Amino acid sequence: MIEVVGCLHAATIVSNLDRAVEFYSDILGLQRVDRNLNYPGAWYQIGDFQLHLIEDVNYRSNHPIDLMKSTRNPHIALGIRDLEVAKQQLLAANCVVKMSNSGRAALFTQDPDGNTIELTWIG
């Protein structure tokens, strides 16, 4: 049996790297790290985990997700310290915000390409 000992990174496709970096860096406040690859992208360090954004200018989501209908969709979940601050910052940036249907302290939003991000309060 394969022994998985950790999660190293997740990668998501974005159509406009500058626009995505503005969302992930300026709105979510993630810490960007250096990368030495020969294609457009941005890497973010989150604890022991990395989030990789890979630019494909031709990317168009085949399955647009309406967060108001359901939050049970593919997503990246990030732990946060203050849910209300996150909610207010996202709303101020004109981002879609949907509180979790489960009633737990979590919300869902989307990056400019419609990739769903869950923000869960971890205290």
Image (cartoon, helix red, strand yellow):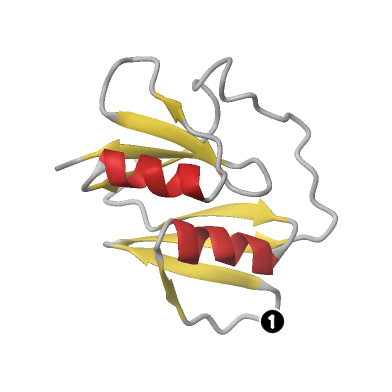
Q: Is residue 65 above or below residue 46?
A: above
Residue 38: image location, x then y, percent: 69, 81
> Residue 105, located in which quarter of the rendered image?
top left
Residue that appears at 54% across and 32% down:
74
> What is the crowding at mark 1: few (fewer than 14 residues within 10 Å), some, or many (at least 20)?
few
Q: Is residue 15 above or below residue 106?
A: below
Residue that appears at 64% across and 24% down:
66
Q: Is residue 5 above or below residue 55?
A: above
> Residue 73, located in which quarter of the rendered image?
top right
Quarter of the C terminus within the rendering:
top left
Relative horizontal placement of residue 108, taking residue 111 as reference (left or right) = left
Q: Which residue is mark 1?
A: 38
Residue that appears at 38% across and 40% down:
87
Q: Is residue 8 above or below residue 60?
A: below
> Residue 36, located in which quarter of the rendered image?
bottom right
Q: Secondary structure at mark 1?
A: loop
- Farthest left residue? 123
Quarter of the N terminus within the rendering:
top left
Q: Nearer the viewer, residue 16 or 43?
A: 16
Residue 21: image location, x then y, percent: 57, 66
Question: Is there any visible trace of residue 8 in the rendered image?
Answer: yes
- Farthest right residue? 58
Q: Nearer the viewer, residue 41 or 109?
A: 109
Relative horizontal placement of residue 100, taking residue 67 as reference (left or right) = left
Q: Amino acid at mark 1?
A: Asn
Q: How many marks?
A: 1
Residue 49: image location, x then y, percent: 34, 59
Q: Nearer the viewer, residue 110 or 50?
A: 110
Relative horizontal placement of residue 112, taking residue 51 as reference (left or right) = right
Question: Is there any visible trace of residue 3 in the rendered image?
Answer: no
